[in-house]
Image (tube, rainbow, N blue to C red):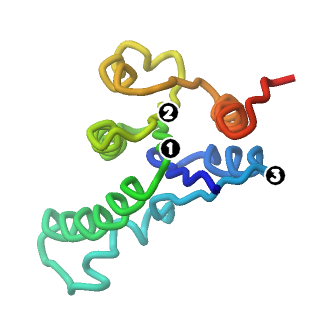
Amino acid sequence: MTMKVYLSGEIHTDWREQIIKGSAGLDVAFNSAVTDHAASDDCGVAILGKEPDKYWHDRKGALVNAIRTRKGIEDADVVVVRFGDQYKQWNAAFDAGYAAALGKSLIILHASAHDHPLKEVDAAAMAVAKEPDQVVEILRYVLTGALPE
């Protein structure tokens, strides 16, 4: 049976690609938020019409994106949420909380520098990884029982 993994959070580095590439050969199907920043920001107004006020422009996009995100998290067996260094990922904190509230197996991925500010988010997770390859090894272990070499 294919494990469904939703990859959420930071969109400015290649962590998703590292996990997907590292998971080659495993029975895993990945889903994710839209990682094209402009498309994600503008989806609401592109579909539902322009807004003269930036607040409502952003809100339309956030709500349309929330439909995709909620569906992806609800359908997932495992949710991986990445917190990056460059930006505050408030949406990632929501995604982690939503996944935890649904009882999803949650893996948080962030650098050690964020251990303290993310301690409550980390407490909701089944695992806290520092590097994408650790996420790959968790998925490999869950699916095969094999430890890293």
Q: Which residue is mark 3?
A: 25
Give the foreground label among 1 and 2: 1
Task: Please give the name of the residue rendered at 32% of the width and 65% of the height, measured from the top-left corner.
Answer: 65
The answer to which image quadrant residue 68 occupies is: bottom left
Q: Mark 2 and mark 1 in contact (Cβ < 8 Å)?
A: yes
Q: Give how far apart the Cα atoms at labels 1 and 2 are.
A: 7 Å
Q: Position of residue 84 (x, y in %)?
A: 49, 35
The answer to which image quadrant residue 88 occupies is: top left
Q: Mark 1 and mark 3 in contact (Cβ < 8 Å)?
A: no
- In the image, taking residue 16 as reference, residue 66 lies left or right, namely left
Q: Is residue 62 above or below residue 22?
A: below
- In the image, taking residue 97 as reference, residue 15 lies left or right, namely right
Give the foreground label among 3 and 2: 3
Nearest to the observer: residue 93 or residue 85: 93
Q: Which residue is mark 1?
A: 78
Q: Give how far apart the Cα atoms at labels 3 and 2 are.
A: 21 Å
- In the image, taking residue 55 as reference, residue 98 lies left or right, namely right
Q: Which residue is mark 2?
A: 107
Task: Please give the name of the residue rendered at 51% of the width and 28% of the height, measured from the top-left corner.
Answer: 110
In what element is the residue under mark 3?
loop
